[in-house]
Image: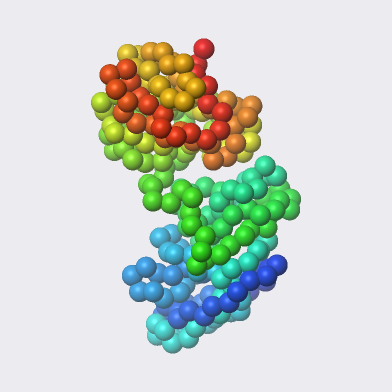
Amino acid sequence: MTTLAANKPRAYEFGSRNALLMIAADIIYEGAAVGVVPASGHARPLAAGDVFAGFAEAKADNASGAAAAIRVELVESGKIELPVTGLVITDIGLPVYASDDDTFSLSPVGGVFIGIVHRFVSAGYGIVHFDAPVLVDPYGGFVHELKSANYTVDAEDAGKWIWVDTDAVVITLPAVEGIGGLRIGNIAAYGVSGVAISPAAADMIEGPDITAADNKDLINTKATARRGDFVEIGYGDANGWSVTRKRGTWAREA
């Protein structure tokens, strides 16, 4: 990933403006996603851990200045055309994240929430609705991890949101007393990846419209799997695990 080194005009549809004081010794280029440093409140080219503030309307050059020497002019809300890694036509309505000031994706793993897909333009490009003061990350408040191969959950995964982006990956659960609970989701495009959650041999996965049985996986059906499908799963009772919330089509292994 490389931050902008030149102005990059964006196509805005409409929006409101703001002006924030900058960090020392940096340049924010036109079109850059701008973050606010939590520890200081100063604006900079967006980086991991920042709070999204909007997009720079013009270049702000504070390369030789002290913190707060100048302000960066921002568009803080509106709709903007962006390159979004992996974006396809079925992703309308999904959240968008930035890992720096010019890298955007649909994954919350290591990203800063900036907005919602409003319209598909072409493969990898879309119109994103952003409203920095108002919109809230629908996946916020969790520790996110990405898994692209089979994985066995352990005690350090309690409370996490584990995302899968590869077909046929199996997430194996420990014995039911092992952890309190977690969320498991599918971050692949529509119909691309099936995800299986596998309990211990003596446990079952119970939940809404699930005919539970010992040692039977819960599967996010590949044919209808959509980016953002997930289950919230936790300690149930002596029988095993319990699904308390789910999105998408999940079926028990035959």
Name the one closer to the observer, 214 or 20.
214
Q: Quadrant of residue 54?
A: bottom right
Does residue 110 sit above or below 251 in this rendering? Answer: below
Number of numbered callouts drawn: 0
Q: Position of residue 79 (x, y in %)?
A: 65, 63
**Residue 99 appears in the picture as rendered:** no
> 247 or 217: which is nearer to us?
247
Furthest-left residue in this view = 177
Q: Residue at x 31, y 28 (%)?
A: 235
Q: Tell which of 240 and 156 is nearer to you.
A: 240
Residue visible at 40% across and 60% down in the picture:
49
Coordinates of residue 22 in the picture (x, y in percent): 45, 79
Q: Is residue 81 left or right of residue 2?
A: right
User: Is residue 6 toward the left or the right of residue 89 in the image?
Assistant: left
Q: How is the image coloured?
A: rainbow
Q: Please state the horizontal and vertical placement of residue 32, each as a whole percent of the image.
A: 57, 69
| The furthest residue to the front | 208
Left-right relation of 93 to 158: right
In the rendered image, the vertical position of residue 115 relative to residue 182, given as above or below:
below
Q: Residue furthest right?
A: 122
Task: Give the vertical position of 164 relative to 117 (above or below).
Answer: above
Q: Nearer the viewer, residue 57 or 147?
A: 57
Q: Residue at x 47, y 25 (%)?
A: 208
Which residue shows up at 68% across the image and 61% down it?
Answer: 81
* Whether residue 75 is visible: yes
Residue 37: where, in percent of width, then height? 40, 69
